[in-house]
Amino acid sequence: MGRGRHALPLARAGLRVFGVDARFDAVRDAVEGARRERLELRAWCADLTQHPLPRSRFDIVLVTRYLQRDIVPAIRDAVVPGGVVVYETFTVQQLALGVGPKSPDHLLRPGELREAFANFDITFYEEVAQPEAVARLIARRRR
């Protein structure tokens, strides 16, 4: 949730938003921000390896600047048929920039994000090296 960085704009747009973060302070800050703006935000403090997302529940799943490979199957399964995943996170090229994550556990290999959603219809995909090295994907789950 990153202190509601993405949750609040989505709620402002009138979407029903459900945010998940393992950090209690991030969940608390997002909920408090939503309350101040009189927005509805459902928030869950959880480790998704212990408490996975519900299956076929969400029209859109948005993941930014986060990579935990063992929950990618649960992310795919959480999207309803016809639903969309929007995903952006760092690639191994970020190491050359000297900032950001350093562990290979948190950096995508070339083409890895596309491969992770190969059974979806990919409508947008790119990997860029500047100003940050990230892979971006928008993909629709097949019906």
Image (cartoon, grey):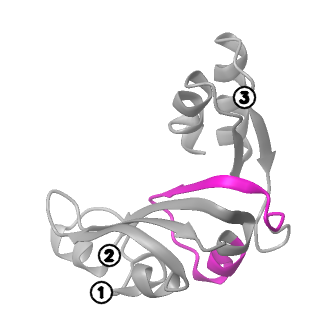
From the viewer's perspective, is residue 96 above or below residue 86? below
From the viewer's perspective, is residue 71 above or below residue 133? below
Which element type, helix, strand or loop, lies under badge 1? loop
As drawn, is 52 to the left or to the right of 120?
Answer: right
Between the residue at mark 3 and the residue at mark 2, the CA separation in whole angstroms equals: 30 Å
Instruction: Work out whether residue 70 or residue 111 is closer to the camera in this orientation and state it.
Output: 111
Between the residue at mark 1 and the residue at mark 3, the CA separation in whole angstroms equals: 36 Å
For label 3, count other residues whose C-alpha is less than 10 Å away and answer few (under 14), some (14-19) or many (20+).
many
Q: Quadrant of residue 1?
A: top right
From the viewer's perspective, is residue 3 above or below residue 112? above
**Mark number for residue 91?**
2
**Mark number for residue 18?**
none
Asked whether residue 22 appears in the rendered view, the answer is no
Residues tagged 2 and 1 counted as in contact (Cβ below 8 A): yes
Which element type, helix, strand or loop, lies under badge 2? loop
Q: Residue furthest front?
A: 143
Q: Residue at x 26, y 62 (%)?
A: 99
Q: Amino acid at mark 1?
A: Pro
> Which dot, 1 or 3, sits closer to the camera?
1
Which element type, helix, strand or loop, lies under badge 3? helix
The residue labelled by disc 3 is: 31
Work out whether mark 3 precedes mark 2 in sequence or the reverse, and give the earlier one. Answer: 3
> Which dot, 2 or 1, sits closer to the camera?
1
Residues tagged 1 and 3 counted as in contact (Cβ below 8 A): no
**Mark number for residue 110?**
1
Work out whether mark 2 precedes mark 1 in sequence or the reverse, and give the earlier one. Answer: 2
Q: Which residues are magenta?
A: 53-74
From the viewer's perspective, is residue 29 above or below residue 92? above
